[in-house]
Amino acid sequence: MSPEVPLPTQTYTVKGMTCGGCVRHVEKALKAAPGVESVIVDLANARATVEGTAPFEVLAARVAEAGYEMVPSA
């Protein structure tokens, strides 16, 4: 049995979140993207951490459809 290879994890800045409802909308949008294994959205730091193989463009489009803006973190 071969060891499991960890999936890539990326952190992005999410603009426009103001409450827990916003966090849930962003989480739902990101989790629906193909290739996403897990999502953690942090309202206080305006960040989303995504584990999986989905490309940024797909994730950003999903978040935009939910009414927010996602950009790569510096």
Image: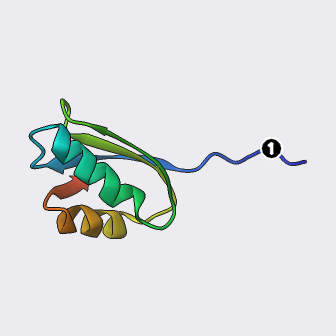
**In which quadrant will I find the C terminus?**
top left
Residue assigned mark 1: 3
Q: From what the image shows, is residue 5 above or below residue 60? A: above
Where residue 56 sits, quadrant-wise, is: bottom left
Q: Quick one: which residue is furthest to the front in this view?
A: 21
- Mark 1: amino acid: Pro
Residue at coordinates 33% horizontally, 55% vertically from top-left?
A: 28
**Is residue 72 at all visible to an observer of this figure?**
no
**Residue lying furthest top in this view?**
44
Q: Is 51 left or right of 16, judged from the image as shown?
A: right
Visible residue check, residue 61: yes
- Residue at image coords 53%, 50%: 8
Q: What x and y, as percent, mark residue 49?
A: 37, 43
Identified at 20% across, 69% down, the residue is: 65
**1 is higher (above) or lower (below) than 59:** above
Task: Pinpoint residue 7: horizontal percent, then vertical percent.
Answer: 58, 50
Residue 3 % position (x, y): 80, 44
Question: Where does residue 57 sit, x and y in percent of width and height?
Answer: 32, 69
Residue at image position (18%, 44%) is 21
Secondary structure beneath label 1: loop
Q: Residues within 10 Å of mark 1 (few under 14, many from 20)?
A: few
